[in-house]
Amino acid sequence: MDRRAVIERLEDLREHCREMIDRVDPECIWRSDAEALTEAIKALSLDIDKNQKGESDMTSEAKVTIVAHDGTTKELTGDTVICFTVSKAAEFLSGKAKIIDANEAFVGHDIPDPLFAATIASLVGSLIEVRQKESPMAAAFTLHEVSRILEAKSKSLVSGASDHQKEAELEKAIEELLKAVFTR
């Protein structure tokens, strides 16, 4: 089913929801369903308009060529390309630097918030598995160490937040998740 057909089906479903709205009940679930469908239709229509104008959307791909210090190249293609650079690793191992300097670059489409954690976790997990495929126990230990470091970072970030801030962020995350589900 192409996007235009999906939009037509969503429009039919929106009309059905509108017909089911209890006009007396301001909190009728059908009202919010109709609003959500309207937003989903807008999002899909925007992607179609971008395609017609030649702009990129979530179906277009980014292409990145990486040139190594020895001149070899590697081409990466995908919806999103994430590149990481690491420096000061040697200084860290020798004790001259306290931290390893790492940077990232995103090329292509931004990873939607509801998918971000799962995407990064999958990347880290597969990187560790590939590097340590000969030793599953070493890979498991490395994954545990990474999770321990991330948990400490998470606790540090949250430690200064009030209960009100935490509740507001939870509500925002749920709203973003619902938007992502309805714009599929």
Image (cartoon, rainbow, N blue to C red):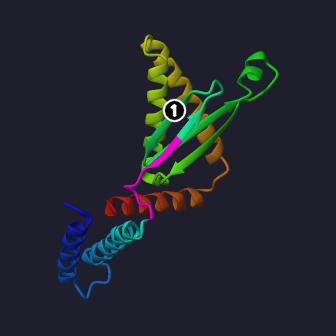
Q: Compared to 34, does 174 lie above or below?
A: above
Residue at the spot 23% in from the left edge and 71% down from the top edge:
10
On the image, the x and y values in percent for residue 19 come to 18, 83
Q: Residue furthest bottom?
A: 24
Q: Residue furthest front?
A: 71
Numbered label tally: 1
Kindly report the secondary structure that dominates the magenta region of the rendered protein: loop
User: Label 1 crowding class (10 Å Cα cut-off): few <14, some 14-19, many 20+?
Assistant: few
Magenta residue check for 152 = no
Q: Which of the 4 image quarters holds residue 103?
A: top right
Image quarter of the N terminus: bottom left
Q: Compared to 167, does 93 lie above or below?
A: above
Q: Is residue 9 left or right of residue 169?
A: left
On the image, the x and y values in percent for residue 141 come to 50, 18
Please name the residue that numbered disc 1 is placed on. 74
Residue at the spot 71% in from the left edge and 24% down from the top edge:
89
Range of magenta residues: 55-64
- Of residues 101 and 32, the one nearer the viewer is 101
Please, what is the three-letter code of the amino acid marked with disc 1? Lys
Image quarter of the C terminus: bottom left
Q: Residue furthest top?
A: 134
Magenta residue check for 56 = yes
On the image, the x and y values in percent for residue 27 come to 32, 79
